[in-house]
Amino acid sequence: MSSNLTVARTLLAVAGALVGLYGAVRLIGLGWGNLVATLPWLAGVVVAHDALLAPLVVLVGAAAAGRLPRWSRRAAVVVLVVLGPVTLLAVPTLGKFGAKADNPTLLDRQYVAGWVAVTGLVLLAAALLAVHDRGKGAPRG
Amino acid sequence: MSGTRVTDVLTRLIDAVPTEKDFGSTARSRELSARVGTWLGVCFLVAFLTGVWSHLAQLPDPLLPLPTRPIWLYRLTQGLHIAAGTAAVPLLLVKLWSVFPQLFRRPPAQTRARLLDGAERLSIAVLVSSALFQLVTGLANSAQWYPWSFSFRSTHFALGWVAMGSLLVHIAVKLPVIRQAWLRPQDVPGPGVVSRRTLLRATWAAAGVAVVTSAVSGVPGVRRLSVLATRSGTGPGGIPINKTAAAAGVTHQATDPAFALAVTWNGTERHLSLADLRAMPQTTATLPIACVEGWSASGTWSGVRIADLLKLVGAPTGAAVLVESLQRGGASSHSRLPGNVAADSRAILALALASEPLSLDHGFPCRVIAPNRPGALQTKWVNRLEAQA
């Protein structure tokens, strides 16, 4: 390893530790009650990802890899990778959890219709990709 | 259950836990992780810098006065903050997928290596936790959804530093791998069903679709495409409303015919009715409202220059102004205009929006509007301006 790389890594690590500590001090400085309310969320998001979402995606991927014909696999990846995150991003708007009865300018779109339209376009693009791949004779992926 | 049986069950459970070699997809590779990770790092850096900027812009008494030009700067930085956070969602999910098997790697046998491994895992736990926390809370905040009891603004700010710090540590640890992956990528054809290229293209597409459908509602011309954004970007006078007069509890006072604005400086106090304000020279300016929650919209505001109001009580040019609202309590009940903002020719106490009297929810009878400021500081239902030395 070159010495330049070592210097860069050391500087990054020291800067990172200082920046992170500053954040931790700020977080603790917000008081005990705030910290106790924050910690379950800090742990919860990791559990939700590592114990629920990620295993689910791995299982779906494994199941799909064994069953889907080869020409449909690229299309399946597009559907999962695009629609999955976009749907997660839409949870607050689809659920309208923050809506206020007195404020019609907040959460003021037709979100279900919007989501259906986005989903339809992504499925259409994926279908075209699958048709293309089938015509070309099932590329490697 | 006897001790041995407990040990047996535990051993069998541990044997059943997959190792990193049990994950089949050959699309996972350091090249994939490095490419997605690099762009994810760029998104987090943009979100961090624009977040710190937003925090500085909200300080009542900044060390360095922030410029009032260009008028759209805060609108741009806040838009970038939201766009970067939105794009980071698919990038982070794919990045975590690409390294997920590492979660199951067995610790090394040697003590020193085991300690280093543990330290790295700890730093990654902090990074993953703070990164997911920032995206989840930021997203919910833009929809005014608060299913928690911590303070959003200050906690999101503190954890922004934690996420940035742990990201820098992570880059320091992985720098040789990242460098190798970019400079000398290994193309392993393998029997994979999905190639790295397919996965990368799908990831960039996901980031693009996410930004367009959720985060461009503040961009004129394309905002209609943001079908999943928390706001369509319109409202009375073409401007959305963050908090209504009813929610702020000011409806009665704001519509009271006896309303008077107090302007004070150094013991001198003037009271101005709405008619008095309308009789003063009026200024019109097109200025954006850029909310910290991410939406923005441009409006044509008319009213009295703050500087003209200060002259009525003999306050010197460049004096800072404490702005108070009829609203009691809450962060938006008051704000402070630093001297350079109060003196700006486009810092207005607005009485009208789009040639119509200000609506009650937009701050009737009068509100502050000044260039290049976070929306939270454009105080509504103003009833007192206090010039300060």
Image (cartoon, coloured by chain):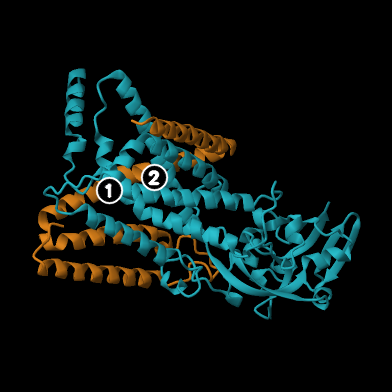
Chain colours: A orange, B cyan
Is residue B8 shown left or right of residue A108?
left
Q: Where the N terminus of chain A falls, by quadrant?
A: top left
Q: Chain of mark 1?
A: B
- In the drawing, what numbered circle is on residue B32? 1
| Residue at position x 14%, y 49% in the image | B189
| Residue at position x 30%, y 60% in the image | A82
Q: Where the C terminus of chain A falls, by quadrant?
A: bottom left
Picture coordinates of residue B254 (x, y %)? 73, 69
Picture coordinates of residue B136 (x, y %)? 43, 51
In the image, farthest residue toward the bottom: B355
- In the drawing, what numbered circle is on residue B231? none
Q: Amino acid at mark 2?
A: Val
Q: Nearer the viewer, residue B300 or B231?
A: B300
Q: Amino acid at mark 1?
A: Leu
| Residue at position x 71%, y 49% in the image | B61
Quarter of the image where one finds residue A42: top left
Q: Chain of mark 2?
A: A
> Tag 1: Cα neighbours inside 10 Å, few (<14), some, or many (≥20)?
many
Q: Nearer the viewer, residue A64 or B123?
A: B123
Is residue B60 shown left or right of residue B238?
right
* Residue designated by label 2: A45
Same chain shared by disc 1 and disc 2: no
